[in-house]
Image (tube, rainbow, N blue to C red):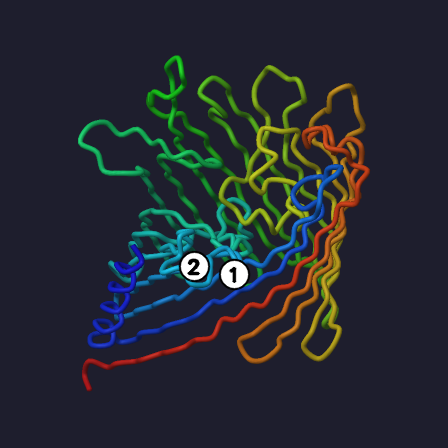
Amino acid sequence: MKNHYYTFLIFFIFTASAFSQTFTLDADIRPRFEYRHGFGNLFPDNTDPAAFVTQRSRLNFGYAADRLQVMVSVQDVSTWGDTRQILINDGNDSFSLFQAWARMQLSDNWAAKVGRQVISYDDQRIFGGLDWAMQGRFHDAALLQYNKGSFAMDMGFAYGQEEQRLFGSPYMISGFFTYKTMQYAHLKKTWTNSAVSLLFLNNGFQKFTGPDGNVADGVYNRQTAGSYFQFPLSSLKFSGSAYYQFGQATPSQDLSAYQVSLEGIYKPGSTLFGLGAEFLSGTDQGSTGDNNSFFPLYGTNHKFNGFMDYFYVGNHANNVGLNDFYAKTVFKTGATSSLLLKAHYFSSNADLAGDADNYLGTEIDVVFTRPVVKNVVLNLGYSHMFASESMSLIKGGTTNENTNNWGWAQLIINPRIFQFQFNAED
């Protein structure tokens, strides 16, 4: 499989150099060490912490002509030491195609973009590139785009199948909210210092029936609709969002859920101060009625609700929701370095079993950032979760009395390796 990728990339390089107006090659090498002692979940008794180094090695090939853009991105995501040194090939199949899309400018205002691509809007709450995850997030989709002045609109469409068939079209790939069909519209209007956007998203998921639950039988649909906004008020900058989810949570359960957030930022000079809150509705523990649990679906969820990923990062679906009150500050620690301090106060949005206290815990996040040399940035992070007894009620009963912390160190190395410009008239 790798040989096919390499052959295609070599062909792409030579043909693009011969005929293109602009060709670029960028690298993204990202090794990250992590020490996990309660990351993503409470740390259980009689367990050793985890420590490892993962690395993303990505090459981005870009081509641009008068009315055509092409992007091909390949990557290897692996853990240091996961392959024996003298194996003839990488048996872990860590090599993948991350992006491969073409964008065609159909007229002055209309364009079409098709292929494997990152879809990211606004603050990345519903759609995001998930750049923190080494593998990132992509969609195999077609977009119709309109842009005129300060108004932009995207309409997206996707239809997923895991293989070519002669009969039927069941979608058997399982995953966290992996859709079979997707349709959405995103509209955005900008002003000098303000912006507002509207999103309507429909996801169709494969429905299964039969005695063993393995017979594909149509789809059931979940809709997400809402808005994101930014506006200044004197020396403050506000941003926020509000979304409503409805349709079906499962083939047999209706969905009615909401998300609301508001953040205020004050930045006198080089120091930033921020206060914010986010409310994501949940379902009462033990409830047998409608599902009231909001899930942010395809966003960069690591960015929200604490860096330790206790909520909505491959977890906390169909749960009690979340109320997140937070404060943050970013200030310079040198000529080019900075330090982020952030504190979260978490509570459940819905009721816990046995009238338990809704307070879940407090998380402290610290991130130090410093450029090392050109195109190289160092990040150092530490997070600590002070979990309550109620946290164990939503985390499988694991004790909350152990220390829950997480430390990491990361290098982001992203140079532009090559750029070639060719004028066909020369």
Does the image show residue 391? yes
Closer-to-camera residue (93/187): 93
Q: Which mark is residue 55?
A: 1
Image mark for residue 76: 2
Disc 2 marks a residue whose amino acid type is Asp
The secondary element bearing badge 1 is classed as strand
Q: Position of residue 400 (x, y in %)?
A: 78, 36
Q: Which mark is residue 357?
A: none
Secondary structure state at the residue bearing disc 2: strand
Task: Check the picture and name the quadrant holding the C terminus.
Answer: bottom left
State which quarter of the image contains the N terminus.
bottom left
Q: How busy is the neighbourhood of tag 2: few (under 14 within 10 Å), some, or many (20 plus)? A: some
What amino acid is labelled 1 in the image?
A: Gln
Spot occupied by residue 263 in the image (x, y as percentages of width and height): 68, 51
Q: How many marks?
A: 2
Name the foreground residue: 226 vs 252. 252
Q: Could you tell me residue 417's position as x and y percent?
A: 41, 77
